[in-house]
């Protein structure tokens, strides 16, 4: 029988605004989503494999399956709560997106390596927000993430 965990049974210090952040991003703050974010925060910074997240959930006494882990990872990646990268063997690994950067900042994230560059340019962010509104899109109050593909120095040298 699967153990149910209620959001209000979690330590409020563990989930500082996670439920509200999920709601603002358009996702219901389910026990699975909030619990997984808490587990990732508790594991620490850096990239983590889905199996590592499942182990942390089990260590905390929370039941889960690897299928649920992958589904929630996809949900959280789609709203830029998590960043996905791949190791040399092509296996996906995940880390928290840059939660500590300010809303007016722009973060360029390489889809292959996970490397990122944060741009502190509120004027550019304002122009991008305005452009989005002109096209019927609404940007969130969170940092703007732009996914890029980095090139190596050899690749860029051939494109002069």
Image (cartoon, grey):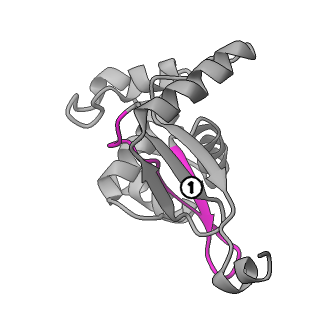
Position of residue 14 measured from the top left corner of the image (x, y, whole percent):
26, 37
Tell me which residue sits at (63%, 44%) in the image. 68
Q: Which residues are magenta?
A: 82-102
Q: Which residue is mark 1?
A: 109
Residue located at (59% from left, 69% from top): 113
Residue 30 visible at all: no
Where in the figure is residue 158, as x and y percent of width and height?
Answer: 79, 82
Q: Quadrant of residue 37?
A: top left
Q: Mark 1 falls on what kind of element?
A: strand
Say whether residue 129 is magenta.
no
Nearer to the camera, 108 or 28: 108
Where residue 100 sits in the image (x, y, percent)? 32, 43
The C terminus lies in quadrant? bottom right
Using the image, determine if residue 44 lies above or below residue 25. Answer: below
Q: Tally the marks.
A: 1
- Which one is nearer the viewer's eye here, 119 or 39? 119
């Amino acid at each position: 029988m699967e153990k149910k965990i209620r959001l209000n049974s979690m330590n409020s210090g563990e989930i500082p605004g996670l439920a509200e952040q999920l709601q603002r991003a358009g996702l219901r703050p389910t026990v699975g989503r909030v619990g997984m974010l808490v587990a990732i925060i508790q594991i620490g910074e850096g990239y983590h494999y889905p199996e590592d997240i499942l182990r942390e959930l089990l260590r905390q006494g929370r039941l889960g399956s690897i299928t649920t882990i992958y589904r929630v990872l996809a949900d959280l990646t789609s709203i830029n709560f998590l960043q996905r990268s791949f190791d040399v063997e092509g296996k996906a690994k995940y880390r928290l997106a840059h939660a500590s950067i300010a809303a007016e900042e722009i973060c360029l994230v390489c889809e292959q390596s996970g490397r990122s560059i944060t741009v502190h340019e509120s004027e550019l962010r304002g122009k991008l927000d305005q452009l989005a509104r002109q096209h019927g899109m609404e940007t969130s109050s969170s940092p703007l993430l732009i996914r890029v593909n980095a090139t190596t120095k050899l690749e860029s040298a051939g494109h002069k």
